[in-house]
Amino acid sequence: MGMNVRVVKALQGVAFDVEVDGDIVHAVASAGYLESQHGARDEPTSWLRAYQHREAEIDDEARAVARERGDRMVLLIDEGNRSEDDTMPAALSRH
């Protein structure tokens, strides 16, 4: 279960912590990811509801990315809406 869950307007998403192999991983599910993958609307309360409704699935996705890449910080984004000009490191994202 995600810990320390909160809406982060500056990052346009929901930040949360998950445990991965005994370590805490900080994660953000972007608004775009929550909207395209989990049916959220374009508003912070909807992002949080979408996360809460699919918490286990989203937490598992963050854990999978952290294990795959060895990262302790994960950003889940909707790569379908990602432009070539985006500067977010690909190592922090998936989906």
Image: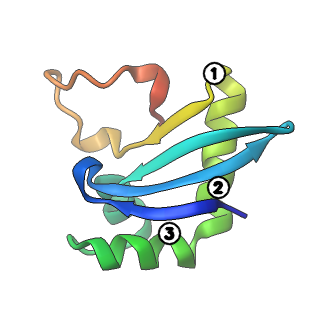
Earlier-in-chain disc, 1 versus 2: 2
Percent x, y for residue 50?
45, 74
**Marks 1 and 2, how far apart at CA:** 15 Å
Identify the element where label 2 is drawn: helix
**Marks 1 and 3, how far apart at CA:** 23 Å
Q: Are marks 1 and 2 in contact (CB under 8 Å)?
A: no
Residue beneath the point at 62% across and 34% down: 65
In which quarter of the view is residue 42 placed?
bottom left
In which quarter of the view is residue 75 placed?
top left
Please, what is the three-letter code of the amino acid marked with disc 1? Arg
Check disc 1 and report the residue beneath it. Answer: 69
Q: Are marks 1 and 3 in contact (CB under 8 Å)?
A: no
The crowding category of the residue bearing disc 2, from other C-alpha atoms within 10 Å (few below 14, some 14 to 19, many at least 20), is many
Residue beneath the point at 62% across and 29% down: 72
Point out which mark residue 59 bears: 2
Q: Are marks 3 and 2 in contact (CB under 8 Å)?
A: no
Check disc 3 and report the residue beneath it. Answer: 51
Percent x, y for residue 44?
28, 71
Please, what is the three-letter code of the amino acid marked with disc 2? Asp
Residue 21 in the figure: left or right of residue 71: right
Please tell me which residue lies in front, 44 or 40. 44
Please, what is the three-letter code of the amino acid marked with disc 3? Tyr
Percent x, y for residue 58?
58, 58
Q: How is the image coloured?
A: rainbow
Point out which mark residue 48 bears: none
